[in-house]
Amino acid sequence: MIGVAAATVLAGCAASDGESSNTSSGPLVVYSGRSEALVAELFSQFSTETGTELEVRYADSGELAALLITEGNASPADVYFSQDAGALGAVEDAGLFSALPSDITQLVDSKFRSTQDRWVATSGRARVAVYNPNLVTTVPNTIDDILDPMWKGKVGFAPTNASWQSFVTALRVVRGEDEAEQWLTAFKANEPVAYEKNSAVRDAVNIGEVSMGLINHYYLYEKIAAEGADAVTAKNHYFTGGDIGGLINVAGVGVLESSKNKDAANQLVKFLLSAQGQEYFAQKTFEYPMAAGVAAYGDLPSIEELNPPAIDLSDLKSIAKTQELLAKTGLLTK
């Protein structure tokens, strides 16, 4: 089910009607794969500052991508805001995005935007090994180190979570189908412990139920913000040197080619990449800002330090094949 929320602002700096063929008097329709709890406040800020009325439909990013592909040029959406680069790649592959203007694309490093300038990242998160220092003295430096028998039964993961499946998709893209299957088969043989979601993996590591877990970096920061640093035992370990375990996936945004309101749509994209929008993600979600000039949260290592694997993030669109492979190797458990 797709939830719908509308924000209407009567005062502000709305552009006058009829200034451009790309300007519509109707509300700007946003399909958002980022949750209402997370981004509604930011959308409200945009409406307040611009006078632009937003109609926002919230749902899973993959669900919304499938809806856009089904609707095609008849979609009412002006903007697609995705939690995941793979879903952006699927919509781009269907030819549904318009090219973004250079004053938008130049704000984001080329590694974190469409090679065809059809979408841009708005924030990023790194894959990490969260570990319990009371149980772990030497943390694996690569994903292949995790296959060592010393980790048998000691590693938590969230098999149905989108971020895990994006990692596996990246593994397939970088190493090929056969090597990805070999890695997953060896990982399964090491008896990893499945959890429903990343936060459950983090909490299991924190209390010593498992020694280590594979999650996104910001889950630890969320726990520290909620409970205080003194209450949290777990620590993040970052895979560096281009290891696929250090994938940086992104949330991102694109403007639909069929939009009758491209001026306002591009204005929203620029707002998400403004200092105000980027600081919102850095401070509220503990994600990496994607536009230059905004500092990452706290003691996060820089993206340059992490040196993530070089991959076209649009290629993460083949999630269905990833799920087939996970099922084949017995890792697609609930």
Image: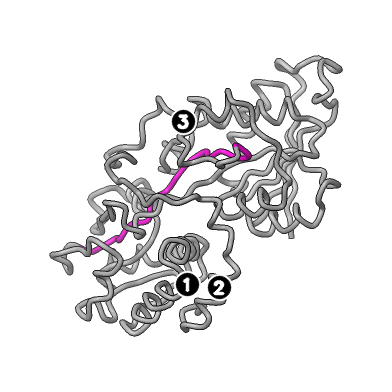
Name the residue: 57% across, 55% down.
86
Lower sequence index among marks 2 and 3: 3
Q: Splitting the image into 4 quarters, where does residue 285 fall?
A: top left
Q: Nearer the observer, disc 3 or disc 1?
A: 1
From what the image shows, is residue 27 above or below residue 112? above
Count of numbered tags: 3
Alpha-carbon distance for marks 2 and 1?
A: 13 Å
Image coordinates of residue 229 in percent, x first then y, are 26, 48
Name the residue: 78% across, 30% down: 261
Real-space Cα separation, disc 2 to disc 3, in angstroms: 32 Å
Amino acid at the residue labelled 2: Gln
Q: Position of residue 101 (x, y in %)?
A: 63, 27
Residues at marks 3 and 1, CA–CA distance in whole angstroms = 34 Å
- Tag 1: residue type? Glu
Q: Which residues are magenta?
A: 117-132
Left or right, 293 with respect to 327, comes to left
Residue 114 drawn at (x, y percent) = 56, 42
**Horizontal side, residue 279 vs residue 234: left or right:** right
Q: Quadrant of residue 149?
A: bottom left
Q: Of helix, strand and loop, which one carries label 3?
A: loop
> Which of 149/271 is in front?
149
Front residue (pair 203, 173): 173
